[in-house]
Amino acid sequence: MTSESAWDGESGVAPDVVQLARVVARLRAENERLEQLASTAAVLERAKGVLMARSGRSAPAAYQELTRRASSGGRTLLEECRRVLGEPGGPGPAPSPAPGDLPEAVPAHRDGSVFDSARYVRRTVPRPGRPHTTAATVLRELGEGLVGVADAQELAGRLLDHLAGPPAEADAVMILVRTADGALELGGHAGVGATLAARWRHVPPVAGTAAHDVIRSGEASWLEDPGRDGPHGGPWPTRAWLPVVTGHAVTAALGVLRTVDAPFAPAVRELLEEAARLCAGSLLACGTPPERADRSAERTARLVQPVLDALPGAAVLLAPVRSATGEVEDFRITAAAPRSVDVADRRGGQLVGLRVLECYPTVAGTPAWQGYLETLRTGRPYACDPCPYEEVAPGVRRLSTFSVRATKLGDGLVVTWTCHDGAARQRELLGDVQRLGNLGWADWNLVTDTITWSQQVYSILDRDPERGPLTLEELPRHLVPEDLPAFERAMRGLLGAGTSVDHPFRITTRSGVRHLRVVAEAVLDARDAPVEVHGFVQDITAQRLAELALMETQQAVLAQRTVLRAERTVAARLQQALLPLPGQSLNLADLRVDVAYLPSHDDLNVGGDWYSALELPDGGVLFAVGDVAGHGIDAVAAMAQLRFTAKGMVFTGSSLADALQRLNTLLLHTSDGHHATATMVLGRYDPAARRLTWAQAGHPPPLLVRRGRAEFLTPPDGILLGAQARPAYGRAEFRIEPGDHLLLYTDGLVERVGEVLDEGLGRLAESARREFGGARPGSLDALLARLLPREQRDDICLMDVHLPRRPVVPPTGPDGAGGRSD
């Protein structure tokens, strides 16, 4: 670590001053660099606009052309832009025009008129000999005419000069620039009188004004209703407002006003939209007085805001807002201290961007307002003695006393003020706190035997103020008897040992029982004897009743949860007894069958999903997968009924369609008051012909994976069981080939919350194709790993029926692991 002397030995300047000078120099260099970048961007935009006007290129194509020319000529992009614009600084002669281009520089006014930006309010007469000027010609001449404009006022004049004749037939042009607070300032105008221009000088950020709507939406507005622009409208039957994009945002609106009482033709609309694009580069290059003023105010605000943030009181930085004649008509708040507040209770940063007369409407015309204007004009600080000020807000009128000080800073003012009626305001705030918190303060002087209550305590205790407050000895008489012992112990500790109290209790009032809370402490004398008790009483009836209701609800939920857990245990044991899961693959006839069953993540319900795979007496194989609607013991009972009944019917020779008919009747007439519905797939496999015959009742179709492809079987007719009395069920057949995988499943595998069923079926088909469609043998565990959601809401039953390319091991027994599963 090193140390430096307090003074520079050579210059005699303090090191901190030297360091500050270095920081200022670095910031000045950075500012110059940023200004150079902005200037370069402006030149680039203007050059692009000239190329777009001459050749009809788009903005990206114009930029590519500038880049190509600069590269082929060995120049920088900025030098090439200046050559296109005909400005000094571009070495060598201007390039020869390409076919279809115009010369690089032409006079802005070919009719010989001289433009005066301060006096241009006339309508330019169309040039003689050009009665049928085309839009392309106007656009090319406009692009050349906008080169070198000095400000937005001149820009507006050039626009009107080229758009006055056909086909645009413009009578006036206005350029409205968006300010930092969202308002619009008139940057330039041509063809309108001074009175109307003054009306457009400042447009507040209110909805319904066409120019504001254009800037917000970025879309052009074509108007034929003279009243569309509100109070700022003029005598033009047709008007167009077009967005002007500088950089990547809409920062201005171009208004083209006409006395022509006819809609804008499509060609005219295209012409005006292109004209607005050409304006962007010129507007960015020349800037406007509102933009420069906003940038200056923003820089000052950025420097002042950290200072205001550290102030303990109220202070703001104000920027003047001037009228068309230059008079100060208001001030805009550009920075504000955190404790600054207006009549609408907006504070600190919420005030930035607002106007003073919006925040403090009655300050206009007061001595303080005159002091602001005098300080802004002369630079002499303003200070006033405490003076009254009437605050006015919706529904509120309050008289306060303030001291105000104002000091000039640059082009603005720093204003601070102090309120001198703090005690009254504090009492008002204390009353609001007691009312909103439903509490009141109380004081018992044990020496003088005087008691003081706030008004809210009388309301809480439901006591008439005319009867006066209660003593500490009288208060227990109003308590509910059950709460009296604990309350008396708390009071003995407070009055005996001086122990603070925070105690809930109940009292009986005319309106019923109330739950209260008392928080109190004792003031002790030199001998540690209490001489005064003060604290507050709070009504917590609503909170306590809500707690009691919540407690009762929680107890009911716990009891219900216990019942549901017991029911789940019974249902799970019943399900395990009725639906045993095989420990390994089943070999049925020449098939290998794998089964997976996954219960849902809901630990309170058991579903009704089930399966069956077994050999029939004739050597065939029966497959079934079903799903009973609902959960719990009822669903498990219906599942067992369907599973064993379906197996018995097929065993006794019933066809698949006939079995489904009878199962439907069974659900309709033996539900014991609980109407159940179910879906099912029944399949019967003939090993001699390798043919599977199947039927379905409203169940998702089986999925066949064959030779690397996965396709769902086309289901025969059939609706879910238990839906109607006389349904019709069809059947379908197909041949199983070696290597095939046939997947039967329940809907829990494919259904997801918030998506259609087709998405789940597609996900299943793709996952099954990847798992079983390749050369390697697949597994149900790997398939389920691909498909299971994070939160499984339903049971899943999945069966894989596979015909190996090699014969399977014959069954070991009628009910063994290698035989069948019931």
Image (cartoon, helix red, strand yellow):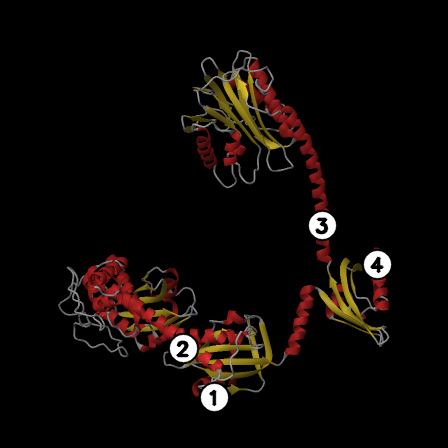
Q: Earlier in the sequence, mark 1 or mark 2?
A: 2
Question: Could you classify mark 3 by the number of other residues whose Cα lies within 10 Å: few (under 14), some (14-19), or many (20 or more)?
Answer: few
In contact (CB < 8 Å): disc 4 and disc 2: no
How many other residues sit within 10 Å of disc 4, few (<14), some (14-19) or many (≥20)? few
Judge left or right: residue 266 versus residue 556: left
Q: Nearer the viewer, mark 3 or mark 4?
A: 4
Cα distance in 3D space between marks 1 and 3:
68 Å
Q: Callout 4, which amino acid?
A: Ala
Q: Which mark is residue 523?
A: none
689 sits left or right of 325 in the view: right
Tell which circle, 4 or 2, labels the residue nearer the N-terminal end. 2
In this rendering, does residue 58 appear at all? yes
Q: What percent of the width, then of the height, locates residue 217?
A: 38, 60
Which amino acid type corresponds to the residue marked 1 in the rendered image? Arg
For the residue labelled by badge 2, is the local secondary structure a helix, a strand or a loop?
helix
Residue at mark 1? 380
Residue 399 at x, y = what percent? 60, 79
Q: Position of residue 746 (x, y in %)?
A: 53, 30
Mark number displayed over residue 25: 2
Tag 3–tag 4 contact (CB < 8 Å): no
Inspect this view and state whether residue 262 appears: no
Q: CA distance from mark 4 to mark 1?
A: 70 Å
Rounded to the nearest angstrom, the CA distance separating label 1 from label 2 is 30 Å
Q: Secondary structure at mark 4?
A: helix
Quadrant in the picture for the C terminus = top right
Numbered tag placed on residue 549 in the rendering: 3
The outermost residue toward the left is 129
Q: Name which residue type carries label 2.
A: Ala
Left or right: 540 as drawn, with respect to 169:
right
Q: In terms of sequence position, does the residue under pointer 2 or pointer 3 come before the other?
A: 2
**What residue is pinned by disc 4?**
486
